Image: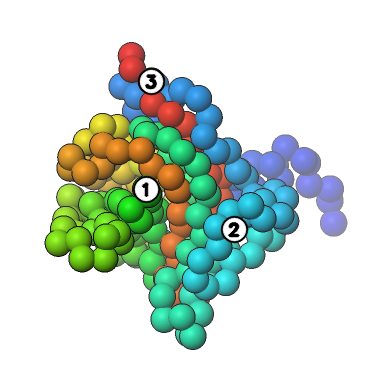
Amino acid sequence: MKHIPSLIIALLLAPLTMPAADPPPSIKAGALIVNEDFSQFDATAKWRWGAGKWTVADGVLKGTETAERKHAAGIACQRVYHDAVISFRFQFAGGSTAMLLLRNKFGNLCRVTLTPTSMTITKDKPNLPADNPEKAVLLDKAALQLKPGEWYAITAIVQGEEFTATLQDHATLKGHHPGINVDKTEIEFLAGGDSILFDDLKASSVEAR
């Protein structure tokens, strides 16, 4: 068998290492909040572990829902920030739902939810206080046709009351809610089903142009 040049091999592998979507030109990324490529097995050792099973292997984070909890698997990077540009990649690897959830001191704040057929952005109902009368608000939605086993890149931006999410080459969702304009405390991934892969998480503050 003839030797295959290394350049050809690199080109064949290039789609597997596609970067996350870049923020739009109107947004200037500032100070780095988190930058994690999951190349180290203990990348999430200091994260807050919630429901489900989470593993780091082969340079990716894998979340799997477990039957005993009857809740999407969750794992959170704890950081204090206000506005942010957050990008990452995800793949449906048997699972049905991938979510980015932003939380604050009162619990759930807002999220991006992705399935093979849809994408939504939502202002969540706070967890605290327990008798809070506020309800979750759907801010925007789009129909999709995503395939299992393929990587997709997404960028979410939370700035003041504005919340946007762009799934590269597919859709951009936009919404606003006064309750989003608060300090945030966590960047959380949620995985519904068996399993969702995440990679190349990067979050930066937003600077005014």
Q: Is residue 140 left or right of residue 70?
A: left
Of discs 1 and 3, which sits in the foreground? 1
Q: Amino acid at mark 1?
A: Asn
Q: Residue furthest bottom?
A: 68
Disc 3 marks a residue whose amino acid type is Glu
Q: Nearer the viewer, residue 3 or 75?
A: 75
At x 37% / y 48%, what residue is drawn?
A: 104
Q: Nearer the viewer, mark 2 or mark 1?
A: 1
Disc on res. 26: none
**Which residue is rendered at x = 56% and y = 45% of the image?**
200
Which of pointers 1 and 3 lies earlier in the amino acid sequence? 1
What quarter of the picture does the C terminus occupy? top left
- Residue annotated with mark 3: 207
Depth check: 19 or 53 in front?
A: 53
* Residue found farthest to the top: 209
Q: Which mark is residue 61?
A: 2
Indicate the quadrant containing the N terminus: top left, top right, bottom left or bottom right. Answer: bottom right
